[in-house]
Image (spheres, rainbow, N blue to C red):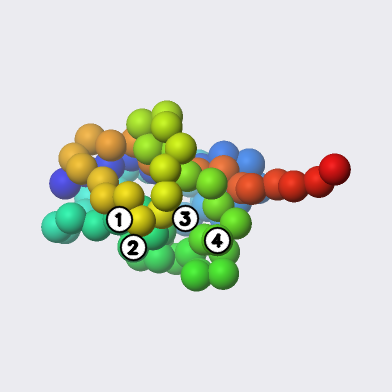
Amino acid sequence: MKIHLSITGPLKKPGGNEEMDINIEGQKDIKEILMEQGYKEEEIEFIMCFLNDKPVDMITKVKDGDKITLTILVGGG
């Protein structure tokens, strides 16, 4: 199965790439995919994730052709 990963902002970019296609085996959720790309558990909790342009949880399963977009959560006031 092939998915597309797009990383925006100051997030760590695996291999230095902001955009990449990833081949994955079996059904996985977004968190599993990110951990396979080198993200650590403590980094993942500060990432906001969109699947096909809709906000989703990290436990959302992906399917062939999905587009995952990552951005960092920021707060302030």
Q: Given the image, on which type of amino acid does mark 3 rest?
A: Gly
Taking 29 as reference, is 49 above or below it? above
Q: Given the image, on which type of amino acid does mark 4 rest?
A: Glu
How far, Cα to Cα, is label 2 from label 3? 18 Å
What residue is shown with label 2?
32
Tell me, yes or no, whether the two marked residues, 2 and 4, touch with CB atoms within 8 Å: no
Q: Residues within 10 Å of mark 1 (few under 14, many from 20)?
A: some
Return the x and y of residue 18 as percentages of the image width and height.
50, 42
How far, Cα to Cα, is label 1 from label 2? 5 Å
Q: Is residue 42 left or right of residue 22?
A: right
Tell me, yes or no, whether the two marked residues, 3 and 4, touch with CB atoms within 8 Å: no
Q: Residues within 10 Å of mark 2 (few under 14, many from 20)?
A: some
- Say what secondary structure mark 3 lies in: helix
Residue 29 has which mark?
Answer: 1
What residue is shown with label 3?
15
Looking at this view, is 31 or 36 the one in front? 31
Q: Earlier in the sequence, mark 3 or mark 1?
A: 3
Tell me, yes or no, whether the two marked residues, 1 and 2, touch with CB atoms within 8 Å: yes
Which label lies toward us, 3 or 4? Answer: 4
Return the x and y of residue 52 as percentages of the image width and height.
36, 31
Return the x and y of residue 54 as percentages of the image width and height.
42, 32
Please, which residue is most extreme toward the bottom here?
Answer: 41
- Say what secondary structure mark 4 lies in: loop
Please, which residue is most extreme toward the right here?
Answer: 77
x 42%, y 43%: residue: 56
Which label lies toward us, 2 or 4? Answer: 4
Q: Earlier in the sequence, mark 2 or mark 4?
A: 2
What residue is shown with label 4?
45
